[in-house]
Image (spheres, rainbow, N blue to C red):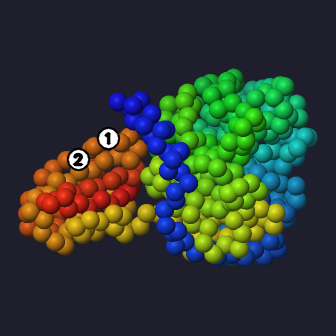
């Protein structure tokens, strides 16, 4: 049944992907930095503190308004990564590491080629770096760096991701296919060995994994066809289908509620922009709105789901004025009117119904799996329903209420 569902989705999505929902009202505001107008990378630690790389080094802010520089003031940095231990890694032609929030830094690796493009760690015991010349791996147990394979100067490794089973993925762009096709590689042994993952020859610029281990890959093109967009895999990279079409994807990110945002480059038709999906890529809203350009280079969710973006060429930093999420609004109403709160819900979801359908059937369906989780009869005259959602897995769900005479309510809620 799941394979049939995936087949139907893969057949329907290409026809739907250029039909975007109404423009969501996300307002963007510039982030003013003390010494710099350029932001090259951004990440957040577990406390919500924001760190950025500028042409003057690494800065941090607790309120995203007032910024302070750390002691690392190198001008050649371009990649920032903060792991679950709040260890900060900043990469350029060197890899720098800080265990104390940026007060002190150590240089732990020299990368002499084009600079470090991507970083991921397994705790602090294993470090993986991607760049122009392949992937490098550090093991604390040996204290040594290993050049895993050399792709010479024809491929850049742009992004890493890791699922809950420990499988590592790395996306790359290959400029020639003589030595490597580029696309996505994966590793089942903590980065010691790598194999291709069935998206060969695509220019993969960004990877992200949601709470259900669904892998998303943003592509800026394909070596032979030029095909770009967002691709999704439900089976760990064995098979892929497209969920967003025709744009050059610079960066994608997924927040704690499994909502996806993508930033697109406007260097190819039909242009760039910022797009958002709350249903695992089935439908999309454009949220570029008041930005002066649709040419996006970088995109990152804060822990609270504010969205930060940088624009290409000038590297200016912007943030959304409000949290980007599905909100509490009614998504689709036909005859039955209802409100869901709190949204996100942790234990009890309250459903307030303000009319009297004769018979109601309430269903809750997981957007991640497509499976119906809850089905129950709601009797006439009931206006307040207290639904226990404490046993549901964190994610996004559809709630539907069917009444008499084909009256229907469909809404979305987040289980936190």
Between 258 and 292, the one lying in front of the other is 292
Depicted 297 relative to depicted 8: above or below? below
Disc 1 packing (10 Å; few <14; some 14–19; many ≥20): few
Q: Is residue 315 above or below residue 281?
A: below
- The residue that disc 2 covers is 374
Residue at the spot of label 1: 371
Question: 83 above or below 299?
Answer: above
Q: Quadrant of residue 36?
A: bottom right
Secondary element at tag 1: loop
Q: Nearer the viewer, residue 208 or 245?
A: 245
Q: Is residue 160 left or right of residue 415?
A: right
Quarter containing the C terminus: bottom left
Q: Residue at x 39, y 52 (%)?
A: 396
Element on which disc 2 rests: strand
Toward which corner of the image does residue 343 lie, by quadrant?
bottom left
Name the residue rendered at 23%, 47% in the picture.
374
Q: Residues within 10 Å of mark 2 (few under 14, many from 20)?
A: some
């Amino acid at each position: 049944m799941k394979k049939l569902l995936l087949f139907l989705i893969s057949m329907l999505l290409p026809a739907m992907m250029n039909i975007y929902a109404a423009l969501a009202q996300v307002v963007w505001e510039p982030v003013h930095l003390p010494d710099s107008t350029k932001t090259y990378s951004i990440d957040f630690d577990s406390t919500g503190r924001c760190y950025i790389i500028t042409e003057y080094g690494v800065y941090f802010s607790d309120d995203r308004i007032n910024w302070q520089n750390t002691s690392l003031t190198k001008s050649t940095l371009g990649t920032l990564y903060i792991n679950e231990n709040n260890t900060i890694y900043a990469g350029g032609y060197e890899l720098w590491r800080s265990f104390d929030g940026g007060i002190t830094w150590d240089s732990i690796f020299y990368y002499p080629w084009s600079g470090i493009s991507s970083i991921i760690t397994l705790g602090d015991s294993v470090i993986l770096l991607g760049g122009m010349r392949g992937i490098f791996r550090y093991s604390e147990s040996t204290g040594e760096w290993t050049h895993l394979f050399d792709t010479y100067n024809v491929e850049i490794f742009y992004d890493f991701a890791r699922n809950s089973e420990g499988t590592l993925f790395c996306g790359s762009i290959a400029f020639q296919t003589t030595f490597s096709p580029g696309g996505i590689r994966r590793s089942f042994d903590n980065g010691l060995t790598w194999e291709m993952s069935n998206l060969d020859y695509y220019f993969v610029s960004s990877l992200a994994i949601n709470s259900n281990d669904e892998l998303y890959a943003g592509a800026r093109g394909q070596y032979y066809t030029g095909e770009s967009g967002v691709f999704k895999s439900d089976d760990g990279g064995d098979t892929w289908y497209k969920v967003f079409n025709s744009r050059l994807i610079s960066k994608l990110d997924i927040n704690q509620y499994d909502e996806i945002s993508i930033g697109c480059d406007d260097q190819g038709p039909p242009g760039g922009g910022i797009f958002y999906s709350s249903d695992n890529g089935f439908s999309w809203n454009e949220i570029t709105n008041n930005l002066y350009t649709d040419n996006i280079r970088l995109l990152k969710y804060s822990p609270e789901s504010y969205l930060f973006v940088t624009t290409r060429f000038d590297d200016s930093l912007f943030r959304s004025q409000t949290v980007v999420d599905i909100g509490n609004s009614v998504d689709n109403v036909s005859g039955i009117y209802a409100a869901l709160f709190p949204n996100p819900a942790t234990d009890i979801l309250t459903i307030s119904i303000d009319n009297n359908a004769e018979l109601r059937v309430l269903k809750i369906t997981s957007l991640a799996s497509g499976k119906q989780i809850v089905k129950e009869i709601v009797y006439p005259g009931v206006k307040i329903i207290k639904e226990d959602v404490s046993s549901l897995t964190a994610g996004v769900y559809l709630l539907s209420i069917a009444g008499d005479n084909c009256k229907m309510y469909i809404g979305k809620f987040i289980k936190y």
